Amino acid sequence: MDSELKEEIPVHEEFILCGGVETQVLKCGPWTDLFNDQSVKRPKLLIFIIPGNPGFSAFYVPFAKALYSLTNRRFPVWTISHAGHALAPKDKKILTSEDSNAQEIKDIYGLNGQIEHKLAFLRTHVPKDMKLVLIGHSIGSYFTLQMLKRVPELLVIRAFLLFPTIERMSESPNGRIATPLLCRFRYVLYVTGYLLLKLCPEKIKSLLIRRCLQLMNLENEFSPLNVLEPFCLANAAYLGGQEMMEVVKRDDETIKEHLSKLTFYYGTIDPWCPKEYYEDIKKDFPEGDIQLAEKNIPHAFIIRFNQEVASMIADSLKDDLSKM
């Protein structure tokens, strides 16, 4: 099935200005402009993927393709990079279609700015009458909850929170290691990364990335060179530091308000949101759709478990999509 997905499913890449920042958007399916497409064939729903950190949208292409195929190729599946996590190649045109009346997004590379960045994209690139399925992975789950809270008028019919880092991040097994690195020694990381990577020739970077993608079974047509770009890595570290400090208390009020449309998907071996977090939220919201992965699917499911997670989402959406 993997070869079928790679060969037959179109994926369109765009670099746009969103909140004044270069942003990569990968669009799975034949629809590239939902605003200006007034035909009867225009889809009524968009599946929108919000990545974890680092927010390299290219990593999510195999997952997006699997999901597009499993939903019978009826709906576009779009993935957006985080602000400052993607830079356009020199020969790539950057599209500008921002709202001239939009306010500047403060601290756009930080936690709050990234949420506003996603909302700004939806305002300028997705019609208001378009129904949405939001899929947040890791910190993308936190962004998803905040988007529902800040703009309740969004026509979100379902939201999937995959391996959700929505509470006690610094207390998690990985958080205890990451917190001192990202909060106390952030500038040491910046300088080290700059010295190691800035002087590295582009050909060597490209070779290293392709080799790593092969080892992770993550080959796709969009080589994420930003993985080794000091500017993007610094922004990922900056966001990570804010995650450790600010993602502490679970937003039970927002969860309660939107519980009927939420699906939580936890892992059994996840050092970012351990099993006890699943047990706690399951106890507090027994009527919610809160699932624990049957297989030992890691937090970074996009490395080898795209098909399994996409199948879970597609099965959950069957009833909703049958009405579209």
Image (cartoon, grey):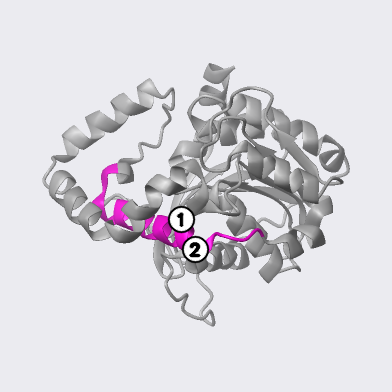
Of the pair 290 and 15, the residue shown nearer to us: 290
Q: Earlier in the sequence, mark 1 or mark 2?
A: 1
Q: Amino acid at mark 2?
A: Gln
Q: Residues within 10 Å of mark 1 (few under 14, many from 20)?
A: many
Check disc 1 and report its element: helix, strand or loop.
loop
Residue 204 x, y percent position in the rendering: 17, 33
Report whether 63 appears left or right of 188: right
Identify whether 294 is placed above or below 149: above
Residue 50 x, y percent position in the rendering: 56, 50
Q: Which mark is residue 92?
A: none
Which region of the structure is painted magenta?
228-250
Q: Residues within 10 Å of mark 2 (few under 14, many from 20)?
A: many
- Residue 283 seen in the figure: yes
Check disc 2 and report its element: helix, strand or loop.
helix
Residue at point 40%, 37% (across, down): 222
Identify whether 118 is placed above or below 313: below
Of the pair 33 and 220, the residue shown nearer to us: 220
Number of dots carrying numbers: 2
Q: Are marks 1 and 2 in contact (CB under 8 Å)?
A: yes
Residue at point 82%, 46% (across, down): 288
Disc 2 target residue: 114
Of the pair 38 and 79, the residue shown nearer to us: 79
The answer for how far apart the CA atoms under marks 1 and 2 are is 7 Å
Disc 1 target residue: 82
